[in-house]
Image (tube, helix red, strand yellow):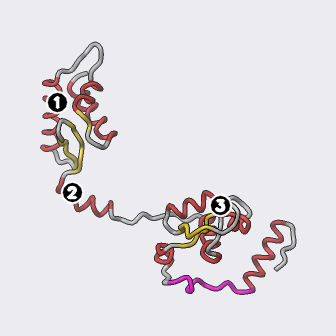
Amino acid sequence: MDDINIKACIEAVLFAIGGAVEEGRLLAALSDEDNQMSKGEFRKIIDELKDDYQNEDRGIRLIELDGKYQLCTKNEYYDVLAKIVNMPKKHVLTDVLLETLSIIAYKQPVTRAEIEKIRGVSCSHAVNRLIEYNLVTEVGRLDAPGHPILFGTTDDFLRSFGIESMDELPDISPDKIEDFRRQAEEEAGIEVTT
């Protein structure tokens, strides 16, 4: 390998690993049976890489940490990086997630089995995703065989939907309930008694 390829190899390894990599591991990765790289050659290439990053207008630098090497952000770009890191993640709520979340919000505390009975399909993925988004949490266990988990909404749910308490959830009018019942009957081909 020529110097440019070795520099590229070092850069690729350090970027992919993310953390600090020991000098010995880098040397082993860069050497093969026919070509053993000496520590002196390695240090020369590392110093050149450090200079490349320092002299060029780049956002990263190569640092040495007790015989280990790592690519990291230059200090002068900390403010920009902090803005990105501190940005709240935007979660996408699909129709399935919204349907599951609304069941939990209106029926809480509720078990997976109760949610699945209402939805008519498995809800494990949807509930897990809502837990991951911190909109739903485990609020206890039902005193029944198997002690199923009871789910409820979180404070993040309230914040996300701009309400202060569950009392602010809109009421479902009797007309809407009748419409839902009629739609369910048509879709399932059965009669639902209330």
Most common secondary structure along the magenta stretch: loop
Q: Residue at x 33, y 40 (%)?
A: 17
Q: Residues within 10 Å of mark 3 (few under 14, many from 20)?
A: some
Quadrant of res 178: bottom right
Label 1 – label 3 distance at C-alpha: 55 Å
Residue 93 position, x and y percent, is 55, 65
Mark 2 is on which residue type?
Tyr
Tell me the distance, in whole angstroms, between the alpha carbons under discs 3 and 2.
43 Å
At which x and y percent is residue 57?
A: 17, 48
Report the residue at 13% width, 24% height from top.
40
Rendered image: mark on residue 123: 3
Quadrant where the C terminus is found in the figure: bottom right
Q: Amino acid at mark 3?
A: Cys
**Among the two numbered marks 1 and 3 on one chain, the one whose residue lies closer to the N terminus:** 1
Which element type, helix, strand or loop, lies under badge 3? loop
Look at the numbered disc 1 and give the secondary structure of its residue: helix
Q: Looking at the image, which is closer to me, 24 or 80?
A: 24
Q: Amino acid at mark 1?
A: Ile
Compute the Cα span from label 2 to label 1.
26 Å
Determine the residue positioned at 26% across, 41% down.
20
Q: Residue 44 placed where, x, y %?
A: 13, 29
Residue assigned mark 1: 45
Q: Which mark is residue 77?
A: 2
Which span of residues is magenta-colored? Answer: 165-174
In-image side of 32 versus 92 (left or right):
left
Q: Quadrant of residue 181?
A: bottom right
